[in-house]
Amino acid sequence: MSGSTTGTRLLPLKPGLGPEKRALAEDLRRLFLTLDVSVRRYAARRHLNASSVTRYLSGERVPPWDFVAGVIVDSAEETERPLTTEAEDALRELHRAALKASRRNSEVQQLQDRLADTDEEIRRIKTRERALEEALGDRHRRLSDLQRRCLRAEQRVEEQRLVHSAELERWEGEYERLHTERQDLREQVLFLEEALAVARAELIAAEEECHRLEAELESTQEGENRVAATSLMEALEATDRTATVTELVDLVGGLETRTQHAIASELVTSASRTREIAEVSALLTGLYTAGLHHHAEAALPAMVMMRPVADVAGLVAALAAARLRPPVVTLLQASVRLHTPKDVAGLAGLLHTAGLADHAASLLGAAAVTRPLPDVMDAVGCLRGHGFAPLVRAALRAAACQRPIRDVLQLLNLLFQDGLGPLVAGMTSALAAQRTASDVAEFLAFARIRGLDHLREATLTETEQRDIAHLADLIYALQRTGNHVATEGVLLRAVGSRAPADVAVLINDLHMSSSFHESSRALVAALTDASAAGVRALVTELNQGYVGADAVLKGAARVCTPGSAAAMAATLEVCGLHEQAETLFQCFVDTKPAGHCGMFLQGLHINGAPSMTAESLRRRARRSTVFSLAQLIRALDTPALRRHLDTVLLVCATAQSAIDTTLLLKNLRDNDTPTGPRAERVVNRLLEEVVLHQPVPGQVDLLLALAMADLGDYARHLEALATRTEQAAAFTKLLKATNRQHEQRPLSRSFWRPKRQ
């Protein structure tokens, strides 16, 4: 390898050298030329005299072996090709041969070798001594522990032996007692088994006699009842045709007294089928007055089946006038269950015409809720065009509120197919006001498929007037049906129209159900549109909820866009809610990628947030952890925020220890994203700030810390920067002194002096 005049060019070998010294000098010169440094620089690096190094390399003086070993190590580091073991052994033989040529040096070397071997043997003996002492101490401890455990075990065995001896004596006595008692019980069992067999035989004989007597008594009573019933039915038939209402009531009461319930009910049923409506009404009134209502209720279904619809309507009107609600209810229920759709519609029309609109609505509504859908459509068709539209709407509203949602949707389809679309509005209104959120969402999906936008909007408008719990359930249901547009609309309208307390409940509910995106949208909308007082009221209400404002803000920071997060943080700061703004800021910066964090910080800067002022950034940089600070630096590394980045880097360079700065640089290098020009630029900028603002001792401490943390590139760059400043001489001197302070010098007295304990 060639060198410059002042570089690696060496003086020629001294003439007249012996073959051993010449061979050693030639090999040593070849190794030294691979270092590509001058003799003077190498002497300074190794803290040697330059003239001594020159004599070693020219062969004038045989160097000590530690000098040769140092050249071997330096050559291996420079060329990255370490010397083989054979080559190093050959070089050592040459060194020994050269030393033999100089008798005094050979003796010194031999003494040094013997000293080194003796020192190594001493270290091995001390190591073995410490190991044996530790093993002996461990065995002593284990022996003492085992002795204590053996003593405790012996004591426990003795205690258990005494206890079990006493227990054994007690159980032996107990066994004798139980054995005697068992023998006595066996004798008693044999005696009782014999007595039981005798009693069973007597029981069988008594039961046979009882059955015979019961059969004889039953045959006798049946004969008497047939004779009495024949005469009684003949008397009742005559009474039914001729008796007055008052007499009929008295007769039913008499039958009730004699427990002839079936006959009494049959008498009332027969009278209800044949008598005039006025008399039937009077009879029912008398029965209810006398407390015999169950006979009346038993007769009414048969009357509904046998009498015309007009008679049923007349009876309902008469009973309603008499304020007898129970028989009216029974009549309407029987009509719903037993009449045809046409008769139900006819009865409802007659009741409506007679001024009993409530009864008519109850009848038709019950039919619309319980009867099959074809029957409902038949009944509606019978009333169509006769001025009964309010009655039909009321019935359909009842169906919309109480029938399963699938039936309601099918009924809507049937109404549209029959051209009865105008009747649908009342149904949708009732559905929106009373059905569950999942039912409303299913109807909205149906309306969207059918293109019924006006009904869908009207339903949304009405159902949004309900309580906040219903709105939260509606949002979940709309999410499940995939109706994201409606979900967004319901959410934003609720936030815009409700009080802060309701909005806080909605946001907390959404957050607790893991609907973080919806919770975030609601929070962004609430903070954007509200006044300062409204924002403070909302945060207060959120803190009173189960999860609290901090948890909601953290959830929003994880899912919302950088622009939305920046707008929220700026709003919170303007409203004086600095603690909440800090929570949002820290969570967003800690959890988002550097690019998103950069956009977030740019948004804060554009909105004029106080957190982006120089003083705020300095405070944040001083109190942040290494991870948070690294993330903040990466986020600030954008053209728009370069001035803010310089502020943070200046704090890192001046207010942090060398260890913290090293950890920060390592974090910047070992980030998940590949290290590129941007990361290198930030690192270089930070090192420049260190050189400009840190005193020389701080720079040296950082360089040493970087070297120990396997950040050699950064350490070399820092050294290069420091040696170009006005303090270069002081830096170099302190660095050399520090390195020399930590070097081990085997030939110095302090190296061999025993260390103080």
Image (cartoon, grey):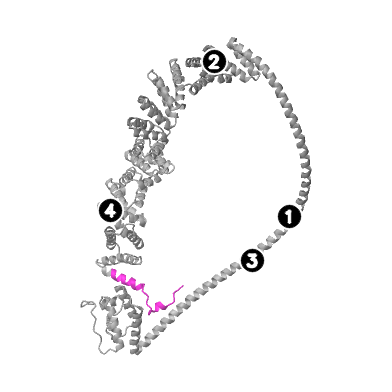
User: Tag 2, which secondary structure?
Assistant: helix
Dot 4 amino acid type: His
Mark 4 or mark 3: which comes first in sequence?
3
Label 4 and label 3: CA atoms lie apart by: 74 Å
**Pointer 4 residue:** 644
Mark 2 or mark 3: which comes first in sequence?
3
User: Tag 3, which secondary structure?
Assistant: helix
**Pointer 2 residue:** 273
Dot 3 amino acid type: Leu
**Pointer 3 residue:** 151
Label 3 and label 1: CA atoms lie apart by: 30 Å
Dot 2 amino acid type: Arg
User: Tag 1, which secondary structure?
Assistant: helix
Name the foreground residue: 189 vs 400: 189
Compared with 648, 394 (above or below) is above
Dot 1 amino acid type: Trp
Label 1 and label 4: CA atoms lie apart by: 89 Å
Label 3: how many Cα within 10 Å (few below 14, some 14–19, many 20+):
few
- For the residues labelled 2 and 4, say whether their Cβ atoms are less than 8 Å apart: no
Label 2 and label 1: CA atoms lie apart by: 86 Å
Closer mark to the observer between disc 4 and disc 3: 3
Give coordinates of residue 292: x percent, y percent: 59, 18
| Residue 507: assigned label | none
- For the residues labelled 2 and 3, say whether their Cβ atoms are less than 8 Å apart: no
Q: Does the stretch in magenta take in 745? A: yes
Q: Which residues are magenta?
A: 731-757
Label 4: how many Cα within 10 Å (few below 14, some 14–19, many 20+):
many
